[in-house]
Image (cartoon, rainbow, N blue to C red):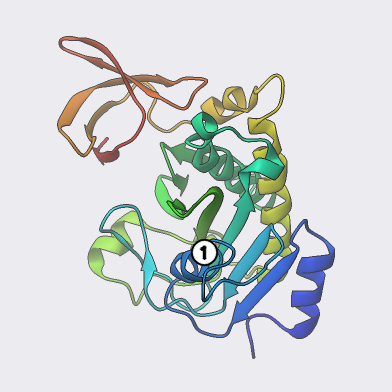
Amino acid sequence: MLPFTAEDLKAIQTETFIEHLDYFESLASTNSWALSTHCIPAGAAVSRETSHPSLVLTGNQTAGRGRGSHAWWSPAGGLTFSLVVDTRILQIQLEQQPLIALATGLAVCETLEKQLPDYTLQLKWPNDVYLQQKKVAGILVETAASQPGLVVIGVGVNLNNSFLSAAAELQSRGTSLYETTGQKYSLASTLIDLINGIENRLYDIAGETNSFMTDWRRYCLLTGRSIRINTGLEVKQGICLEIDEQGFLILQTETGIERIISGTIEHF
């Protein structure tokens, strides 16, 4: 049985803001495909005219990518997709783009929470969703220098997959909705809910009040914790005080308070 039927794909386009859909039974990476086919300047030899927002969806991602050099393990039953959005249409300014990963993570967390009212969902800055203290979803936001207005939002959700076949390290750190609840979930219905939730939170970024970070902080996994963070230039250690309105992690170190816009949490 295919993960997505023709009826599913039609529903995705009619019930969300998606203007264009690319579906593959199997694909190495939805983000890589999106970057290589959608984020090409008009007029280039291999460019194509595509309406946005666009969705790149696969039932089987074979080489998913995470932040930096990390891979995203995405076996059968998982939900993996990429949204290509035009920040000019969404009225998201360049300096606001770091908030896209946070808004997407919040939307994923809120959507899954509706399915899991009796379980604890949290957000690990900047791009992970945790269920019962284990990673259940990740977000990878990428841009292409040739098309700075277009942003690719990759989302991977462990929905119906099992970690029994995963490496021991992944089994200790990851989980899925199925493994947590013992129930199976509709890929198509969950995807539709996720896309609609992400759309609403993306528009919140450019909203006059920009108050979605207040909601984000309610789910923050790191606040008050001692953490070690690799910024790419150096490794810092301290207490996470909060994530501020601009999406910066506020870190209390031995030498003072620092605002960090990007990094990888190595320990918490």
Quadrant position of residue 168: bottom left
Q: Give the residue pinned by disc 1.
A: 40
Q: Nearer the viewer, residue 58 or 53?
A: 53
- Extreme-top residue of the structure: 256
Q: Nearer the viewer, residue 89 or 113?
A: 89
Quadrant including the C terminus: top left
Q: Residue 235's x, y, as percent?
A: 15, 32
Relative height, residue 220 to residue 194 (above, below): above
Relative height, residue 55 to residue 247 (above, below): below
Relative height, residue 10 to residue 240 (above, below): below
Please give the name of the residue rendered at 63% of the width and 46% of the height, measured from the top-left corner: 113
Quadrant including the N terminus: bottom right
Relative height, residue 177 to residue 149 (above, below): below
Quadrant position of residue 23: bottom right
Q: Residue 29's x, y, as percent?
A: 44, 71
Q: Is residue 120 visible?
A: no
Please give the name of the residue rendered at 47% of the width and 31% of the height, measured from the top-left corner: 220
Q: Residue 28's x, y, as percent?
A: 42, 77
Badge 1: how crowded within 10 Å, few (<14), some, or many (20+)?
A: many
Quadrant position of residue 16: bottom right
Amino acid, disc 1 = Ile
Label 1 element class = loop
Total marks placed = 1
Q: Residue 3's x, y, as percent?
A: 63, 81
Please give the name of the residue rendered at 16% of the width and 9% of the height, measured from the top-left corner: 255
Please give the name of the residue rendered at 72% of the width and 63% of the height, measured from the top-left corner: 51
Q: Is residue 208 visible?
A: yes
